[in-house]
Amino acid sequence: MSSDSDLMEVVSAIEPGSTSVWLECPHCSADAQHQASAYKGPSDSGVFVIAPTVTYGVTCDACGKAFYFRPKALTNTSLLSDVGPSWCKFLPDVNRWAAELAALARADMQGEIEALVWPYRLGGDEYLSVDMKGVEGGDLSITFGVGGVESTEYDFDNLAGNTCFNVPDMTEALSMTVVLMEKLSATVVLHNRQR
């Protein structure tokens, strides 16, 4: 049995006053939402406390293994996923967005999901379109408006009614698409529309 000092730690940037956070388990990569109200002590106020000495013990519902969560303040440098040539660390909200949208998409589509992903320009602006369809029925299309915003507009309060999401750059749009496609186990085709 491992001691508390052997537990893995997940550090995640959150907005001050956050009442919940989506975390990826470092053991099995399962995503789950955690509520500050579930913790006694510093979070008695119902929000996660951001301080260098504050951590929260988490047990993954999927694999049953424990880890620590250490919140850090969201800053302008943490408004984008950390994606490089040989590494990738998505923002927690990217995982939350993909998990929630995948659940909505699964309700609308039957069977295996195929996705056509294609970029385009219109009126000087860039877009990324993701057209999904269930092999046995149903479809869902989303579009990323690229640029013009400093941080991604996830629109969590209206996720079911939204089909366009504004993101800071094409890397973030593609990163969000990758996470969504993984959660849907979708077959992806990169393509440009025919003339």
Image (spheres, helix red, strand yellow):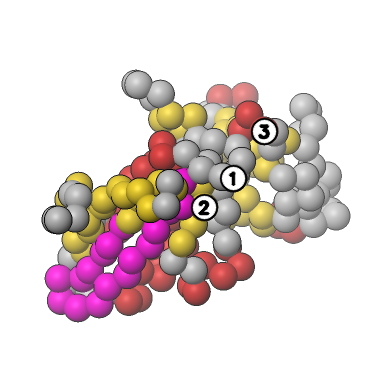
Q: Earlier in the sequence, mark 1 or mark 2?
A: 1
Q: Which mark is residue 166?
A: 2
Q: Secondary structure at mark 1?
A: loop
Q: Nearer the viewer, residue 3 or 35?
A: 35
The reply to whether callout 1 and callout 2 are in contact (CB within 8 Å) is yes
Q: Which residue type carries mark 2?
A: Asn
- Residues in magenta, as a range: 130-146
The residue wearing badge 3 is 76
Q: Residue at x 26, y 50 (%)?
A: 118
Judged by depth in the image, the label closer to the viewer, 3 or 1, is 1
Callout 2: SS = strand
Check disc 2: other Cα within 10 Å, few if <14, some if 14-19, many if 20+: many
Task: Choose the circle earlier in sequence order: 3 or 1.
Answer: 3
| Magenta segment includes 134 | yes
Residue 14 shown left or right of residue 163 in the figure: right
Residue 154 position by quadrant:
bottom right
Q: CA distance from mark 3 to mark 1?
A: 12 Å
The residue carrying pointer 1 sits among few (fewer than 14), some (14 to 19) or many (20 or more) residues within 10 Å by Cα, namely: few
- Residue 170 percent across, percent down from the top left: 41, 40
- Residue type, mark 3 in image: Asn
Q: In front: 105, or 9? A: 105
- The answer to which of 69 and 17 lies nearer the viewer is 17
The residue furthest front is 123
The x and y percentages for residue 94 are 49, 47
Relative to 17, say whether 9 is above or below. Answer: above
